[in-house]
Image (spheres, grey):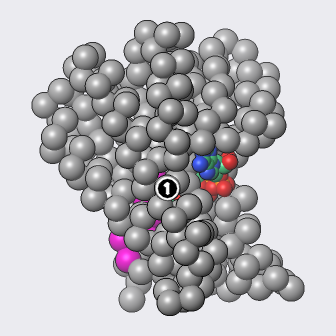
């Protein structure tokens, strides 16, 4: 991993930050992308102080805007000369509501970020990887990219789409040494999931968390570091032949019915 160049989107907190730390610990060079400028600055400070030898660049971008995506790809190539891996992680949950009542503006925003953001990143990173004849892409789907989740129509639709685009990228660009996979996390304790528990039970989010955890085969939630370790494998040369898969990391939750 030493000296390899990785782009991480949604890197300011949660799963993105945990993966950035895991990659920094291996000596990688990083371009961290997020639209939360303050949190991104904090994330860079944290990584640079924990891993002083790591070269870290940051780029404030809204991944749903193609011009912003072009900007962070240009930064990676101009600063580091190549892109070995893309962790296409930025995403939002939207609001919880039944399909018919779902707020249309929120629906469109979820599509713009979770679907178009992932697409734009692949659209602009893949040509760089093609020229290198090497690359690894890890897109972030969800358990909601494998099955339905009550009151999350927009999220589930976009995460299934991420899984679909992953299959297409895999079969179209595998011949250029580019392996593309998706991960499908279950409930991992990040700021996004904490917010979801607040929506489920505004008076007692901790009770919602405990109840949700009891439904998991492991009776617990996952930690961002668990996911970061899987990402580190898939985004590295250690992954030599896994391509086009959506890999659940959910304590077995997606096998329940
Ligand atoms: P989070 O909300 O804790 O962190 C997401 C980060 O992405 C934030 O820093 C946010 O500012 C950034 N971001 C959001 N929209 C952006 C945009 N348009 N442009 C740039 N940055 C943007 O969320 P998380 O839990 O770490 O989730 C990360 C990814 O994992 C998401 O795609 C999410 O759908 C997926 N996921 C998470 C879980 C989980 O349990 N935490 C489960 C399944 C899937």
Which is more toward the observer, 167 or 17? 167
**Residue 221, quarter of the rendered image:** bottom right
Start-end of magenta stretch = 140-147
Within 8 Å: ligand 1 and the Cβ of disc 1?
A: yes
- Residue at 29 percent across and 50 percent down: it is 166
Above or below 3: residue 90: below
Q: Is residue 146 visible?
A: yes
On the rendered image, what quadrant is the C terminus found in? bottom left
Q: Which residue, given by chain and number where applicable, does mark 1 sit on?
A: 112
Above or below 72: residue 225: below
- Residue at 37 percent across and 57 percent down: it is 162
Which is more toward the observer, 123 or 210? 123
The residue carrying pointer 1 sits among few (fewer than 14), some (14 to 19) or many (20 or more) residues within 10 Å by Cα, namely many
In the rendered structure, the answer to whether residue 91 lies left or right of residue 41 reads left
Q: Is residue 39 magenta?
A: no
**Residue 1, quarter of the rendered image:** top left
Badge count: 1
Q: Position of residue 42 (x, y in %)?
A: 80, 33
Above or below 87: residue 131: above
Q: Position of residue 80 (x, y in %)?
A: 49, 11
In the rendered structure, the answer to whether residue 173 lies left or right of residue 50 reads left
- Residue at 66 percent across and 32 percent down: it is 60
The secondary element bearing badge 1 is classed as helix
Above or below 105: residue 115: above
Q: Position of residue 113 (x, y in %)?
A: 52, 53
Please tell me in which quarter of the rendered image ligand 1 is found.
Answer: bottom right
- Residue at 71 percent across and 83 percent down: it is 200
In the rendered structure, the answer to whether residue 171 lies left or right of residue 240 reads left
């Amino acid at each position: 991993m030493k000296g390899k160049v990785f782009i991480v989107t949604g890197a300011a907190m949660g799963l993105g930050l945990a993966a950035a730390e895991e990659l920094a610990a291996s000596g990688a060079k990083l371009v961290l992308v997020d639209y939360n400028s303050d949190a991104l600055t904090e994330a860079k400070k944290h990584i640079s102080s924990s891993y002083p030898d790591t070269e870290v660049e940051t780029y404030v971008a809204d991944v749903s805007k193609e011009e912003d995506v072009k900007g962070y790809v240009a930064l990676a190539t101009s600063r580091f000369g190549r892109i070995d891996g893309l962790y296409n992680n930025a995403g939002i949950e939207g609001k919880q509501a039944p399909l018919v009542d779902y707020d249309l503006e929120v629906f469109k925003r979820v599509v713009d970020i979770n679907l178009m953001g992932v697409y734009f990143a692949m659209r602009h990173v893949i040509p760089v990887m093609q020229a290198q004849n090497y690359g690894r892409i890890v897109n972030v789907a969800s358990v909601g990219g494998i099955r339905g989740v009550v009151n999350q129509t927009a999220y589930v639709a976009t995460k299934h789409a991420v899984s679909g685009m992953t299959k297409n990228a895999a079969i179209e660009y595998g011949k250029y040494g580019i392996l593309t996979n998706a991960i499908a996390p279950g409930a991992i304790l990040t700021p996004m999931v904490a917010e979801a528990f607040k929506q489920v039970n505004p008076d007692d989010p901790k009770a919602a968390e405990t109840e949700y955890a009891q439904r998991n085969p492991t009776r617990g939630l996952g930690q961002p570091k668990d996911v970061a370790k899987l990402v580190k494998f898939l985004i590295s040369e250690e992954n030599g032949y896994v391509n086009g898969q959506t890999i659940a990391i959910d304590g077995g939750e997606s096998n329940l019915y």
